[in-house]
Amino acid sequence: MTRDDIRQVILDILERIAPDEDLSNITDDVPFREQLELDSMDFLDIVMELRKRYRVQIPEDDYEHLATMQGTVNYLEPKLKDVVK
């Protein structure tokens, strides 16, 4: 998967979790929680969706890497490099 593919996957997951949010202006380096009304359960839903769709295991100690779009893409890129979209 490319970086753009991963970004789109994250946007798709966010759209499912927070359907009323405007995702068109997501800034890559600003934490999701500052841009969207997400709580800790929503964040866990993102992690669980990644696990379900792509069998990506994300240890709790790594959650901090998923705070922003840029951090999430950077974290997932090596894990999803061999996944065909």
Image (cartoon, rainbow, N blue to C red):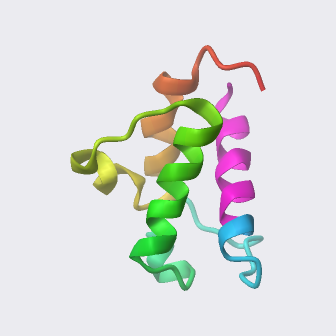
Which image quadrant: the C terminus?
A: top right
Farthest-out residue, front: 52
- Residue drawn 71% across and 82% down? 21
- Whether residue 53 sits left or right of residue 45 in the image: it is right
Residue 51 position (above or below residue 38): above
- Residue drawn 52% across and 30% down? 77
Instruction: Inspect the magenta stretch and tell me whether residue 12 lies in it.
Output: yes
- Whether residue 28 sits left or right of residue 11 in the image: it is left
Toward the viewer: 62 or 34?
Answer: 62
- Whether residue 15 sits left or right of residue 46 in the image: it is right
- Whether residue 76 sits left or right of residue 81 in the image: it is left
Instruction: Inspect the magenta stretch and tell me whether residue 76 lies in it.
Output: no
Camera sees residue 30: no
Q: How many labels were placed on the picture?
A: 0
Farthest-out residue, left: 61
Q: Position of residue 29 (x, y in %)?
A: 47, 61
Magenta residues span: 1-14
Residue 72 position (above or below residue 81): below
Which image quadrant: the N terminus?
A: top right
Q: Position of residue 37 (x, y in %)?
A: 54, 85
Q: Position of residue 46 (x, y in %)?
A: 54, 57
Q: Name the image quarter holding residue 13.
A: bottom right
- Residue drawn 46% across and 77% down? 33
Q: Position of residue 63 (x, y in %)?
A: 32, 53
Question: Which secondary structure type mostly characterizes the magenta part of the structure?
Answer: helix
Q: Name the image quarter holding residue 35.
A: bottom right
- Residue drawn 71% across and 39% down? 4
Residue 32 position (above or below residue 52): below
Camera sees residue 76: yes
